[in-house]
Image (cartoon, helix red, strand yellow):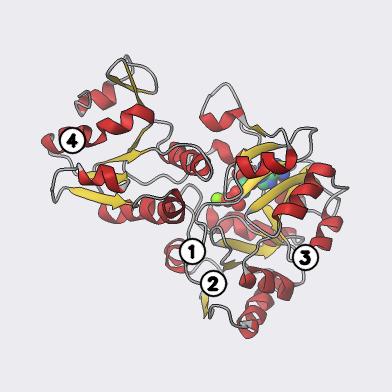
């Protein structure tokens, strides 16, 4: 299939492009489009056959439900049996914006969208072109991130094309996404709202408006808990090389571990802030992803940097964790998944992998104990 391409011009009326792309949606095809978080792969959310094409293009397991995107408040009434006060408060304070609410679904939402669940995920993006495109389509747009399942989400049109060229009807190129990590997902169907996936709207922002907010305990990788968002159980955002995530005090030992890996003759991808980067040895065998000093920049560049490691192909990737305040919670959630929960911490001056010295075979092969 030929994938059509439309270049959008920032802060201008791109109506002709939206209209042409919307014609494909009405014909039951898939179109990739920009949002403030990441690029989405959209199809008519009320057309079961069109929705199936999203799963096929991404290679997405069909037990993983999709988010329905809307471009005006009223559309939500057709998609749900009703909103409680928490859902209404989120809509009032944070929509349009980088947040998704889980609500009880109405009968018009196809089974393929909700993957058989009695609930549906709804998002109203703030990106002007996303809104205008959805309005031109005249239907709710089912859209997961526009990547092959398991790969980092795309935050620019080139990354979408890398995964989707020839598989979808077209792409609207709106340039790089502003936020860079996916929307916060909040389940509003119980009395206490629960964050199922952290994102652009932070825990702190939510508690200020809603009072008590819980975080799905499965987000910390504890195998005793099953994630409430089915998609969170899959390995995700993962570059091809193994990733070790250094958390807390262990981050101070990252540069020592890089040297150890170099001594072993390995090439090393390093994802770290400016201060850590300064302490690294000069070596052509280091592929450095230095994100500077503020977490918003890291959120914005994270998926691009993870994808870039697949272009440079290091033997191993060592990533520095950040504190979990604000957008840090979303960053650490994505990094922990990219690392497949291979987490390095420090206790009593000894580096531990996944909290256990005994389980250190992989790490000690690299002599990572300082
Ligand atoms: P994405 O592929 O980035 O669009 O991810 C969408 C996320 O929303 C996945 O983790 C899904 O499992 C989750 N999701 C969608 N619908 C629901 C729902 N009804 N209940 C819980 N999680 C949902
Ligand atoms: Mg995704």
Q: Residues within 10 Å of mark 4 (few under 14, many from 20)?
A: many
Which residue occupies the foreground of this view, 214 or 119? 214
Q: CA distance from mark 4 to mark 2?
A: 41 Å
Residue shown at 71%/51% (left/top)?
A: 113
Q: Examine the rendering and report whether any part of residue 127 can be seen.
A: yes
Extreme residue toward the bottom, this view = 16
Whichever of callouts 3 and 4 sits on the residue coming sooner in the sequence is: 3
The residue beneath circle 4 is 261
The residue beneath circle 1 is 164
Q: Are marks 2 and 3 in contact (CB under 8 Å)?
A: no
**Does dot 1 land on a helix, a strand or a loop?**
helix
Whichever of callouts 1 and 4 sits on the residue coming sooner in the sequence is: 1
Horizontal side of 326 relative to 271 (left or right) equals right
Q: Are marks 2 and 1 in contact (CB under 8 Å)?
A: yes
The residue beneath circle 2 is 171
Q: Position of residue 131 (x, y in %)?
A: 68, 69
């Amino acid at each position: 299939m030929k994938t059509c391409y439309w270049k959008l011009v920032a802060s201008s009326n791109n109506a002709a492009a939206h209209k042409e792309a919307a014609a494909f949606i009405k014909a039951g095809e898939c179109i990739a489009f920009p949002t403030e978080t990441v690029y989405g792969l959209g199809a008519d959310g009320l057309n079961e056959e069109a929705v199936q094409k999203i799963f096929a293009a991404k290679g997405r397991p069909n037990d993983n439900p999709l988010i329905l995107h809307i471009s005006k408040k009223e559309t939500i009434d057709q998609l749900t049996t009703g909103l409680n006060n928490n859902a209404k408060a989120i809509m009032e304070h944070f929509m349009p914006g980088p947040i998704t609410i889980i609500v009880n679904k109405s009968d018009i939402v196809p089974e393929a969208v909700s993957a058989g669940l009695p609930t549906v995920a709804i998002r109203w993006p703030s990106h002007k072109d996303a809104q205008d495109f959805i309005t031109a389509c005249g239907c709710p747009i089912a859209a997961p991130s526009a990547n092959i399942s398991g790969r980092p989400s795309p935050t620019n049109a080139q990354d979408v094309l890398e995964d989707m060229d020839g598989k979808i009807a077209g792409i609207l190129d709106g340039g790089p996404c502003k936020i860079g990590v996916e929307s916060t997902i909040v389940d509003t169907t119980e009395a206490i709202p629960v964050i199922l996936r952290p994102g652009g709207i932070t825990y702190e922002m939510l508690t200020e408006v809603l009072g008590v907010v819980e975080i799905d305990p499965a987000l910390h990788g504890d195998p005793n808990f099953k994630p409430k968002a089915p998609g969170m159980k899959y390995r995700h955002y993962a570059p091809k090389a193994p990733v070790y995530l250094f958390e807390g005090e262990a981050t101070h030992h990252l540069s020592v571990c890089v040297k150890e890996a170099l001594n072993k003759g390995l090439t090393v991808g390093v994802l770290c802030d400016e201060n850590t980067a300064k302490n690294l040895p000069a070596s052509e065998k280091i592929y450095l992803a230095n994100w500077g000093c503020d977490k918003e920049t890291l959120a914005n560049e994270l998926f691009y940097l993870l994808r870039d490691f697949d272009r440079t192909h290091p033997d191993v990737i060592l990533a520095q964790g950040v504190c979990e305040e604000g957008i840090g919670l979303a960053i650490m959630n994505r990094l922990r998944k990219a690392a497949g929960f291979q987490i390095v911490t420090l206790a009593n001056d000894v580096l531990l992998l996944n909290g256990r010295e005994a389980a250190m075979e992989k790490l000690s092969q690299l002599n990572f104990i300082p």
